[in-house]
Structures are given as C-alpha cells and as structure tokens.
Amino acid sequence: MEPLYIVIGLIVLAAVYFLFIRKPEAPKQIEKAPEPKKLQDKKPAAEPEASQKTADKPAKQEAKKAPTKQPTDEAKEAKPKEEAKPPPKAEAAPKEEAAAAPKAAEPVTKPEAEAAPTPAPKVEAAPAATKAIVPGAAPPPVAPRKKDVAGLRRGLSKARENEGFFGRLKALFVGRSEVDPGLVDQIEEVLLTSDVGVKTTEVLLEQIRIRIKRKELVNDDQVWEALRTRMREILGSGGGNIKLPARPTVVMFVGVNGAGKTTTIGKLATRLKADGRTVVLAAGDTFRAAAVQQLVVWGKRVGCEVVSGKDGANPGAVIFDAIQRAAEIGADVVLADTAGRLHTKTNLMDELTKVAKTIDKALPGAPHETLLVLDATNGQNAMQQAAMFKDALPLSGIVLTKLDGTAKGGVILGVCAEHSLPVRYIGVGERPDELRDFNADEFVEALLGQADEATDAAA
C-alpha cells in the first residue's frame, strides 16, 4: 500500500506543479509576447513599402517623408498667426480672408512671388504719361508769381546809384519847378551813355519833345511820368516766363561764350522743379567739358536727369537723345544747352541751324522756345549779338543776365525796341531765385520808381 500512496502523492505534486506553479509563468511569457509583436508590426509596415521600392534608398525616402509631414503640422499651427495678419489683404472682404486662410498656410514664397509683380504697374506709369505727348497737350499752367519790386530794386542797385542809369536821370529833375527846354537833351545824353542806343533813345524822346513844345508837359513830374510810360510801352512787347505748349516743351539756349547759358539753365531748372515740373537737361555744349560737368552738378543739385555725350560729340544727337528720354519718362520740359560761339563766325552759326533741324526731327514743332542769353555788361555789343543770332535762328525771347553787375542796363530797352524780342527772364544775382520772370511794369517801377526801398518794404 505504501508504494500506492507514494504514486498518488507524486501525481498530486505533479498536478499542483502544473496547475499552480507552472501556469502563472506561462501568462507572463504570453504578456511579454505581444510587446515584440507590436514592434514587429511597425517594422514590417515600413519594410514592405521599402521592399516594393529600391532596397538601396529606404532611409532617404523615409527622410523625405519626415520633413513633408513636419511643415504641414507647423502650417496647421501657423494658421491662426497668418489669419491675424490682414494688412496685406486689407482690400479683401472678411469672408474672403477666412476662405483664403488655408492657402496662406502654404510656403511663404508663393505670396511673395505673387506680390513681386505689383511694382510693375508703377514702372509702367511713366510710359502712360508719354501717351499725352502730343502737340497742345500742355501741362497745367503755373500760378503767377507775386510781385517783388523791392527785391528787384535791390538787384538793380548799381543802376540806381548816383552814377547809375536811374541815379543820373533822377538828378536831372531835382530842384526844378518847371521844365527846362534843355531837359530833353540832358535826358538824351544819359540814355545814350547807358547803352539804350540811338534808335531807342529817339523813340523814347520824340513824343516827349513834342508834348513839351505843346505845353502838355509843364513840370518835372509830368515829364518823368511820360518817360516811364514810354519805357513801359517799349518793354511791354511780350515777356514773362516761357510757355509750355507741349509735353515735353523743348527750350534751346544760345549765346556767346561767357554769357551765362549753363548757369541760366540750372537756375531755370530749379524754378521749374519747384513748380512741380519734371525737367531733363541736355548737355549740348559738347566742345567744353566744363559745361557738361557744370550741368551735371546742377542736375544733381536740383534732382533732374542729365543726358550728355562724349567730348566733341554731335550736339544735335545729344539733344535728340534727351528729347527721346524725356518722352520715355513723361517729362514736362527739356532744357538744351549749346556751345557758345562768336556771332561773327558764320560757320558756327550755321551749326546752330542744323541743331534746330535735328530737334524738330526728334519732336515736330520743337524747339518751342529758342532763347538768346545776353550779358548785360556787354552793352551795345549785346545789341549786335541779338541781330546776328536773330538772322540765324527764329528767336522767341531774350534772357538778360548780370543786370546786377552793371550801372547801365539800358541795353534791355534797345533789344526790345530794335529787335521786337520779348525778355523772358532777367538775372539780378547769383542765387537761383534771382533769375526773375520779366515784367515790364515791375522793371520800370524798380528802375525809375519814385519810391525807395523803405516805402516798398512798408507796402
């Protein structure tokens, strides 16, 4: 019996072993098994895709997938930030901004590329202005400038001194209670020695003599006023600043060496720029390098474009290019400089006519103004220059410079009376604002007015 109990005991021990001792260890192994299965599930998931492709580039393809997913996640996070920046799309309605928000989450390079073409219309705005470049399409007129007789009187101070034009005339009338028969002869002497010229002096005094004989002028005030009236009539044959009949208006400046053409162009460009005009400067004085450099300096100072050529280049070609450039940018005015030349040199004067023809080819009807620049200190020689240049070119006006540097100044009367040329501008100083529009009433009042500077300042 004992062996039987021993066998039964062994069976019970084996059952306990298999049921209570070995069975709990099996579940622990089963629980650990799923963990490697999960890891194996992920690895095979990528391995089949890699196996379908080339086995050489699995890492590169996974690297490509990784960055593509990261921007999309960042883009989702960036949506609220980009929606919070409406200024670039301020013109769009709020609904359109909300609808466009997902697109704004795309790479930033796309909006920048779409915004890049926006400056193009601004650049094309200049050609749009060139459509208005037709005869008669003039810029709006500039408001007339205020009268400044006191400032003009200061500029003409030398002519108003005791030894000057005005001072000597005024001295003839001091202390007279009635008209002296010899007064007219004394006035004639003053006029002739002040560069007024013989013909102009006769025109001025002819009617005064007749009226004195008729007893129509019985005192010095009446004679003085009659003289002022005759001067006003002679100087009033036109004048004032240049007109702008077309866009661009081409103004050609001519004159002898040293008359002040280049400086006058710089001053006039300053005035036009201040009036809101777009100006192009043409360096047509190709025979004097200093003239080109001087014009370039003026261009930088004023803010005008300067078109120039090489030394000795054809001046007509340079001005032609300047007109073309002005048409491209829609400029209002072209101020064309030319080389100074002696009025007695026929071949040089003929060159000016060729330049004028070239300008007409560049823009039919141009030059719209041909201004002769005269140095007031040259006196009667300036009268001869006006005659020669008038024969060679259809002059439209005169610019009289350096009036502040002469005690005579009567040449302005001679030019207007003998050549019927209007005075456009007068120079009474070095500053740009001392190039003045010529006005006959202001000039006569400044030169022959009875009032002094204190009276003008009070007025």
Image (cartoon, rainbow, N blue to C red):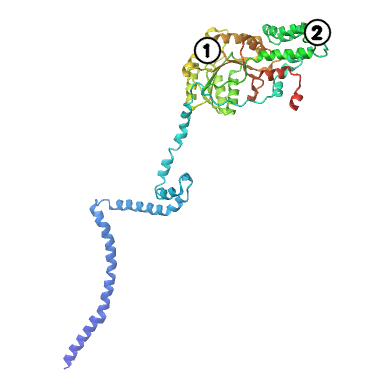
Relative side of 283 to 149, left or right: left
Crowdedness of circle 2 by 10 Å Cα count: few (<14), some, many (20+)? some
Where is 92 relative to 450, above or below?
below
User: Which residue occupies 68% across, 17% down?
Assistant: 405
Residue type pointed to by label 1: Leu
Residue 331 numbered mark, or none: none
| Disc number lying in front (2 or 1) | 2
- Reading the image, the residue beneath label 1 is 352
Residue 127 visible, this orientation: yes
Residue 316: x %, y % from top left: 49, 16
Number of numbered discs overlaid on the protein picture: 2
Residue 328: x %, y % from top left: 47, 26
Residue type pointed to by label 2: Asp
Crowdedness of circle 1 by 10 Å Cα count: few (<14), some, many (20+)? many
Res. 279 image quadrant: top right
- Reading the image, the residue beneath label 2 is 180
Q: CA distance from mark 2 to mark 1?
A: 51 Å
SS under mark 2: loop
Residue 408 visible, this orientation: no
Relative side of 349 to 98, left or right: right
Residue 354: x %, y % from top left: 49, 12
Earlier-in-chain disc, 2 versus 1: 2
